[in-house]
Image (spheres, rainbow, N blue to C red):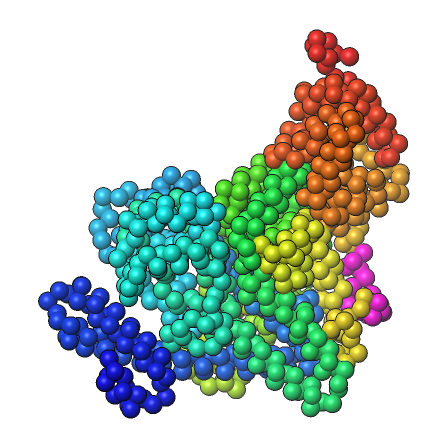
Amino acid sequence: MNPCIDAVRAAAGKLEDQEIAEIFEVLRGRAKEIMAREGALGMEQATLRAADELGKQARQAALIERRNALINLRRRGEIVSFVRNNFADRPDLGIESLLVGTNLARQGSRLSVAAEQKSLGDAYIGGLIHDLERADLTAVLAKGSADVDIADALWRIGNDLDTSKLNDQVVDIARIIQRYQEAARIDANRAGASIGKMPGYIARQSHDSEKIGAAGFGKWVEEIRPRLDPRTFDGVSDEGKFLRGVFDGLVSGDHLKFNPDAKPNGFKGPANIAKKMSQERVLHFKDGVAWHEYNQLYGTGNLREAVLRGLDLSGQNTALMRRLGTNPEANLNMAMDILKEDLRKSGDTSALQNFNTARNTMIDNRFKEVSGQTRIPGNATQARIAANVRAWQSMSKLGGALLSSFSDLPVAASEMRYQGKSFLGSLAEMVGGLAKGRGSLEQREILSSFGVYADSMRGEIMRRFSADDSMGGRMSRGMGLFFKFNGLSWWTDANKASAGLMMAHHLAQNKGRAWGSMDESLRRTLSLYDIDAGKWDLLRGMDSRMADGQNYLTADGIGDIPAERIGEYLTAQGRKVSDSAIRETREGLDRSLRAYVNDRVSYAVLEPDARTRSIMNQGTQPGTMMGDLNRFLLQFKSFPAAFMQKTLGRELYGRGYAPTPLGQSFRGGRDLAGVALKGLLGKGNGEMAGIAQLLLWSTAFGYLSMASKDVFKGREPRPADDPKTWIAAMVQGGGFGIYGDFMFGAANRFGNSAAETAAGPSFGTAFELINLWNRVREGDDAASSALRLAQNNTPFLNLFYSRIAMDHLFLYSVQEALNPGSLRRTEQRIQKENGQEFLVRPSQSYVDPLGIAR
């Protein structure tokens, strides 16, 4: 090799010796592959062919690097322009709006990276689910029994092999899945990736580090080796060493971490998301059956979960590149350096200092949320155990979550009022929508165009109550079943369908109106997603969709807008008309319209968004001490946090509020509450009326939730003439859910004190265990306490409709037998604290060991 190295050094003097040696190692490995594949070739011929292939790859890599440099330059310019044009007084809030969105009524303040990530991933998955439902194939995929056949069909289709011997339904499902995976691949490549079409691709493979670690390296290799395709070892000189490295990475969780120091392969720069998406898979399976067998042995879920997870992740990464470039973190930092220089030149040292503080704290946390860093475990095993403990608590404690959700209806009505519709009319539509459920097939098709679809299919109802999404596998499927049993899946699906359809119909009703003649509230809301007069004229020129006698405006018609009309819009904007500019304008319209409906539905049917999660996670990772401690403390608190941040935040800041100038702001660019609210309710923009109406109706529905809970506990509703009742109803209706039970009483419905519940359900249970142990050590009779502890921590036992029956048929008798007189003491305590009587007293249900009722 030495003479060759000298020759290369003479021709390309910029290369280091190590780089030249690596080129020759790659060349030698590729030549061996070619010789093995085509045995008639000699070493010289194989080396020449290998050199030709590598040369073509190098030229392609150079083109990719130039293309990505231009992409990054353009995205950087867009970031700076957005902040300068809309947030010149508060660049810190401009960057926050870009990343996770804010409630400020400024152009594009909600068209964030996070909003696009959610709408794009939901669009892929919503379209997939809709196509499956239209072909009546959803149940086949969801059941999981046909997974091996579907995986085999995907592999065969990807390799252009015969599928005639497979079941027609299986083949149809595979073709639908492949269609959306291919759409996601093309979108990623347009955004800056370079993902080749891989023959036989099935789905993103998951790996359960616990199962792999428990099996050990020897058994894992024994199981996986015969299932791997020889392509896995292309260019690998030591297969054992290679598999050991893969095994160690999977067990430690390092496979989830992106290595910015990996070989560029045409993608240079730190944390290059395009490079990450374009890297070839490390493990290649020989066919679909082998992939499925490995997924059963060492994966974290079934085929459905793997497909949906892959589409969702693709949407997240593609949206990140679309808005921040192929090197998101580096590109964002370069844009912020430009904005920092603007502040330095202005001479406002306080503003510069506050911007730097916000950049290192708040903005850093927001970026970690949208980049996915807060979902990468520090220690995979620790993260999984902690997540499963929290999931166990959820299935033990949220049996009555449906009864706590009645305030969703006035919250949705307040959102529609913000968009210019009548509050009471919207409230009536939301109530009526409960009878329609998810709507007709045509209505679901409209919803799928916006990515609004059944969360129950994806098993993500839990995200309404927790910022934690690190659980997976069987526990995740158990959670999905639990929320189906407690009624929350149906409730959420029905309300999301009603809200999404209302918005699409409201847009269709305004098609005949020019921008200036539309209701000011609707114009303001659309402007949050960067829709202006020119874009509205393009959108309202589309054909609307008809379903069940009503018209709806959907994103499906954007592709049919004539190119001439888009060209006229570009000319009016002073932009050059070209095919690429027309295509980008269509993509922008699609992005804005989808994000508008998808994001506002999350305001109507409240769930934490990326901003809420970033506030709660504070940039921490699961599987770390601070990360898991934070998630334990904040379990069940993300829903009330979302109410304050989104619902109240919208009413306070979403109608023209002007934030404090950056040079006068506090706490790293964040306004103090007193400064922010000073004179806010007197601005005359409708803030006071909006909050008053919301509080009135949410209190009324909060009382309805409390009364329903009382009835299902076997008690009379709390007295309506007691002021404490209505204060508690206000708290209950304000998104605090189970916390409304104890905030004006000594304990919540599970027997924990306010302090214990504030510390989170897991720590509350730990406190109970400690107290129980102390009682046992002191010789006290702890049997009754042990029974109560078991009751309150057994999944599915606290379902609101079954608990009362179990109490009267069995549990009350056991409790009284273990602790005589406890039932009467409970009745007296409830009477004293809440002024309530039991509809059927627990003491009446006691049956002694001889079977004689007392």
Q: Is residue 504 left or right of residue 754?
A: left
Establish if 744 lies above or below 181.
above
Identify which residue is drawn at 80% across, 39% down: 747
Residue 765 image point, x, y percent: 70, 40
Residue 775 image point, x, y percent: 77, 31
Asked if the stretch drawn in magenta spans residue 145, the answer is no
Which of the 4 quarters of the picture holds residue 392? top right
Residue 31 image point, x, y percent: 21, 71
Q: Relative to the observer, which residue lies in front, 198 or 709?
A: 198
In magenta, the rendered stretch is: 674-692
Establish if 742 lies above or below 285.
above
Q: Is residue 159 left or right of residue 194?
A: left
Identify which residue is drawn at 85% across, 69% down: 679
- Residue 94 in view (yes/no): yes
- Residue 437 in view (yes/no): no
Identify which residue is drawn at 69% across, 85% down: 343
Residue 115 image point, x, y percent: 57, 64
